[in-house]
Amino acid sequence: MVDLLPFWITFKLALITTAILLVISLPVANWLASGKGKFKSVIEAFISMPLVLPPSVIGFYFLVAFGPAYGLGHFLEHYFNLRLVFSFPGLVLASIIYSLPFMIHPIQSGLSGLSPDIREASYLLGKSKWETFFKVQLPNIKPALLTGIVLTFAHTIGEFGVVLMIGGNIPNETRVVSIAIYDEVEVLNYHTANIYAGILFAITFVVLLVVNIVNKRYAITRNL
């Protein structure tokens, strides 16, 4: 019998992470695409680090930063009764950090590809910077937005290393599908592991296929 609860935890984690990252990434990507500053390259490098760092490195530093035996983790637990290690909120925070470039980079690329004339024309019509951003720029980068959202969602679903180190394997709280597959393989229960993996494979394939189709249709519509 396949336990469907890991799927619920996985998709809840992916939805929350994607929603929070979308809110965070919009102003950050806009600044990276159009802003200037001597620390811009440093911030871009920091954002991109999860693309090349092993998940165990991020998980380790997260444990050091938020473990109850250390300063920040002890402070949060003592004064706010908040434990991030081996908890669902901790999974969300770790997923936000680990999936950050998958949301920011597509949006930044889309904004960088827009002609500056679009922004300048909006300013001439009396629109503020934020009105221009939300009513003019964002509607013109719908494929980039959709790509960022889907990549973030799919990447969060597929997390394993960070999830294992931060969330552990707590049933009904932090046991996501990737952990459930690992558990079944450990006990040589390949049949159940195959069911978990097959469902996850099918869902992610369909999601990515739909995104590709939508982006191609959007590109055709814009060229007409």
Image (cartoon, helix red, strand yellow):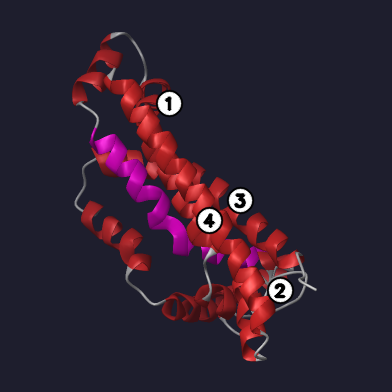
Look at mark 3 in the image and give the residue it sits on. Answer: 15
Residue type at tag 3: Leu
Q: Residue furthest front?
A: 191
Visible residue check, residue 167 = no
SS category of the residue bearing label 2: helix
SS category of the residue bearing label 1: helix
Q: Residues within 10 Å of mark 1 (few under 14, many from 20)?
A: few
Of label 3 and label 1, which has the lower sequence position?
3
How far is disc 3 from disc 1 in space, using C-alphas?
22 Å
CB atoms of marks 4 and 1 within 8 Å: no
Residue type at tag 4: Thr
Look at mark 4 in the image and give the residue it sits on. Answer: 204
Look at mark 2 in the image and give the residue it sits on. Answer: 78
- Closest to the camera, between mark 2 and mark 4, is 4
> What main secondary structure does the magenta stretch of the protein show?
helix
Q: Position of residue 179 (x, y in %)?
A: 62, 76
Of label 2 and label 1, which has the lower sequence position?
2
Look at mark 1 in the image and give the residue it sits on. Answer: 134
Q: Residue furthest bottom?
A: 187
Q: Residues within 10 Å of mark 4 (few under 14, many from 20)?
A: some
Instruction: Please state the extent of the stretch shown in magenta in the rendering.
Output: 89-113
- Closest to the camera, between mark 3 and mark 2, is 3
CB atoms of marks 3 and 4 within 8 Å: no
**Position above or below: 3 against 190:** above
Visible residue check, residue 146 = yes
Residue type at tag 2: His
Of label 2 and label 4, which has the lower sequence position?
2
Locate residue 76: give its quadrant.
bottom right
Residue placed at 53% from the left, 56% from the top? 204
